Image (cartoon, rainbow, N blue to C red):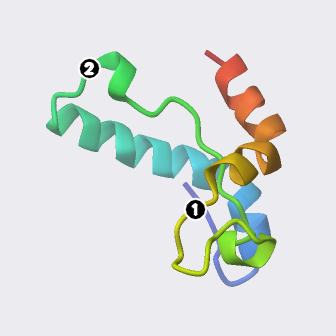
Amino acid sequence: MNINVDTESYEEMCQNPEVVAMILEHLEGDAKKGKLFGFEKIKGLYISPISFGDNDLLTTTFKLKRNKAKLFYKEILDNLYSKD
């Protein structure tokens, strides 16, 4: 894969299908090494260019506000689960 990190911004890299495919490929290899079952493997991936702290999804003790995060990423999660 030809990914030029010098010309792409972080946001562009997060949305680059080649970057996502490369990470999924790496995770698939780790899943095989760990002998994971099919339901334990990652099948879809979204890389957010925005950190949880920047969109008020963390508590003061840096724990994820799960309900707020679920609402914030609802459309993205729905798209990932519909690809199965």
The three-letter code of the residue at mark 2 reads Phe
Q: Which picture quadrant has residue 42? A: top left
| Secondary structure type for disc 2 | loop
Q: Where does label 1 land, which residue?
A: 64
| Image point (57%, 62%), residue name | 64
Gap in angstroms between the C-alphas marked 2 and 1: 27 Å
| Image point (68%, 84%), residue name | 6
Q: Where does label 2 land, which residue?
A: 37
- Mark toward the start of the polypeptide (2 vs 1): 2
Can you say which quadrant of the picture contains the N terminus?
bottom right
Q: How many other residues sit within 10 Å of disc 1, few (<14), some (14-19) or many (≥20)?
A: some
Is residue 69 left or right of 20 when viewed as pictured? right
Q: Is residue 75 above or below residue 36?
A: below
- The x, y position of residue 29, in whole percent, is 28, 40
Q: Is residue 78 above or below residue 28?
A: above
| Secondary structure type for disc 1 | loop
- The x, y position of residue 53, in whole percent, is 68, 77
Q: How many other residues sit within 10 Å of disc 2, few (<14), some (14-19) or many (≥20)?
A: few
